[in-house]
């Protein structure tokens, strides 16, 4: 089964469908599966939050780990479940005080627990590689190096902005020597250590989730204050591997929809799904009316939802229908709620995200907006394309690597509501005035392959490089 024999522990803080916060939860579900299919013995480990839902699966008790934190022995129970659709062990780390609700000290204890798993093995199994994700796992490489554990580290950055600044006291509680930490001068004053940075510095290799973003983070504009240090890492240490999506899950031929369709009968398929969505949203059922979607976290800094909001206040809403789906910053949830209550026939705001709802939205909309200020990868454009909803997006990060302007989407450069509006209108003009050309774009989008196949192969090559 595991023909390449590689043993990889995939450490992450969310894992769909057991617990999902954002795109990382989806990646954690789909990437290990793709690597498993390539013969990697990959296992996933997450904290056992109270909110974890195992979907009725029976959990199996594996072992107890003892972690020393703040001079005290902290006991952690390790449970095991399996991926719903693959034979991949998922370890759940249970400790009521530290791991049941994400808190300030959760990650110190979690990172130590991972190192203990590496040291002693779990389930008669020891990883050769720890594949860590984001700031939550920032101290794993350093701890393992300090403990001289024979394991290699790949560190993946999904979110550079969330760096997690940890008080020095907490680092000491983890038993780490502060002198080993790469404390930045201006952080010394705050007496804080940047978790994400420790991950980057001490991991053997580091990647982000698209090639463009891997280049962008070396610049001041996108480096979130870390660019100077990122540039000092040895050449080739930081690179990009594009995320993928799972077509077993995202497929308009099989999902529960008003009408199933593929690229061949997309015109009819989308027409029926659009009409259904319009009805559900309380909009006029009109095929000519442009129906535009947004799916994502309502996060102003990254997702540029303020640009959408500003545009909505300006344009002639009678000519458009918009549906916004996503939770996020309360202030923005309120703003969209208010706007939708003023214009219920033209704007709908849905604050309870579910994958099923998102799929209905992709299937029913003509265009989706992704005006991100920065975007490590984003899955929305890839999923939208599969449903023939054309992305209108900012030319940045993973959006730039997946969208070809006027071939399968529309791109704009400047993060401004005017640029967004101009590009949206251009896209809609094409839909209305050149329906033949627009349908060609839709088909091209639907036929693009964003499966994990290629990217999982690239991860496998990286793993091989690490252990050779
Ligand atoms: C984060 C990033 C997003 C990426 C996802 C999974 O949510 O913002 O761009 O697609 O992680 O890697």
Image (cartoon, rainbow, N blue to C red):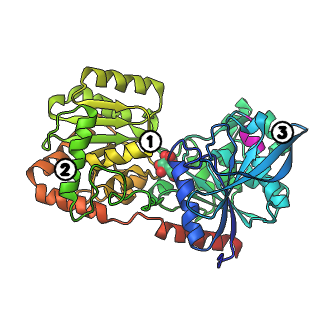
Q: Residue at x 17, y 56 (%)?
A: 438
**Disc marking residue 354:** 1
User: Circle 1: is it few (<14), some (14-19), or many (20+) Cα within 10 Å?
Assistant: few
- Distance from disc 2 to disc 3, alpha carbons, whole Å, reads 60 Å
Residue projecting furthest to the bottom: 3
Q: Residue at x 23, y 45 (%)?
A: 274
Which element carries disc 3, helix, strand or loop?
A: helix
The boundaries of the magenta stretch are 105-109
User: Which corner quadrant of the image does residue 86 belong to?
Assistant: bottom right
Which element carries disc 1, helix, strand or loop?
A: loop
Q: Is residue 119 left or right of residue 246?
A: right
- Mark 2 vs 1, N-terminal side: 2
Is the CB–ligand 1 distance for label 1 below 8 Å?
A: no
Q: Which residue is mark 2?
A: 271
Assess whether residue 230 is covered by the magenta stretch. Answer: no
Q: Residue at x 17, y 38 (%)?
A: 285
Residue 90 in percent (x, y) is at 67, 56
Q: Quadrant of the N terminus?
A: bottom right
Depth check, front residue: 87 or 439: 87
Q: Residue at x 39, y 59 (%)?
A: 401
- Distance from disc 2 to disc 1, alpha carbons, whole Å, reads 23 Å
Is the CB–ligand 1 distance for label 2 below 8 Å?
A: no
């Amino acid at each position: 089964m595991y023909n390449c024999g590689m043993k990889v522990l995939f450490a992450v803080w969310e894992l769909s469908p057991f617990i999902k916060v954002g795109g990382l939860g989806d990646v954690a579900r789909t990437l290990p599966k793709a690597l498993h299919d390539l013969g990697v013995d990959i296992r996933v480990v997450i904290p056992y939050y109270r909110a974890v839902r195992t979907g009725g699966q029976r959990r199996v008790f594996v072992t107890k780990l003892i972690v020393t934190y703040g001079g005290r022995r902290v006991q952690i129970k390790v449970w095991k479940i399996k991926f719903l659709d693959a034979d991949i062990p998922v370890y759940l780390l249970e400790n009521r005080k530290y791991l049941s609700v994400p808190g300030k000290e959760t990650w110190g204890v979690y990172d130590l627990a991972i190192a203990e798993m590496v040291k002693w093995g779990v389930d008669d199994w020891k990883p050769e590689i720890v594949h860590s994700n984001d700031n939550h796992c920032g101290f794993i490489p350093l701890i393992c190096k300090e403990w001289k554990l024979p394991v290699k580290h790949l560190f993946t950055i999904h979110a550079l902005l969330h760096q997690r600044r940890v008080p020095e006291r907490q680092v000491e509680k983890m038993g780490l020597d502060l002198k080993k930490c790469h404390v930045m001068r201006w952080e010394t004053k705050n007496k804080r250590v940047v978790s994400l940075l420790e991950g980057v510095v001490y991991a053997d290799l580091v990647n982000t989730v698209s090639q463009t973003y891997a280049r962008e983070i070396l610049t001041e504009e996108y480096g979130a204050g870390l660019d100077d240090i990122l540039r000092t890492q040895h050449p080739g240490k930081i690179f990009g591997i594009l995320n993928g999506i799972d077509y077993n899950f995202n497929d308009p031929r099989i999902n529960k929809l008003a009408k199933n369709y593929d690229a061949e009968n997309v015109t009819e398929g989308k027409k029926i799904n659009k009409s259904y969505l319009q009805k559900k949203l309380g909009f006029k059922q009109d095929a000519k009316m442009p129906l535009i979607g947004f799916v994502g976290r309502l996060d102003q800094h990254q997702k540029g939802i303020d640009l959408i909001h500003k545009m909505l206040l300006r344009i002639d809403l009678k000519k458009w229908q918009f549906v916004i789906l996503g939770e996020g910053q309360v202030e923005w949830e309120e703003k969209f709620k208010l706007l939708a209550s003023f214009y219920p026939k033209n704007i709908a705001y849905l604050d309870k995200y579910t994958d099923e709802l998102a799929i209905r939205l992709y299937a029913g909309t003509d265009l989706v907006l992704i005006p991100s200020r920065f975007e490590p990868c984003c899955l929305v454009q890839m999923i939208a394309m599969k449903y023939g909803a054309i992305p209108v997006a900012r030319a940045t990060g993973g959006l730039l690597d997946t969208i070809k302007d006027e071939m399968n989407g529309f791109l704009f450069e400047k993060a401004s509501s005017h640029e967004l509006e101009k590009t949206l209108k251009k896209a809609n003009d094409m839909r209305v005035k050149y329906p033949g050309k627009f349908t060609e774009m839709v088909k091209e989008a639907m036929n693009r392959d964003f499966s994990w196949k290629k990217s999982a192969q690239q991860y496998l090559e990286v793993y091989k490089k690490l252990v050779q």
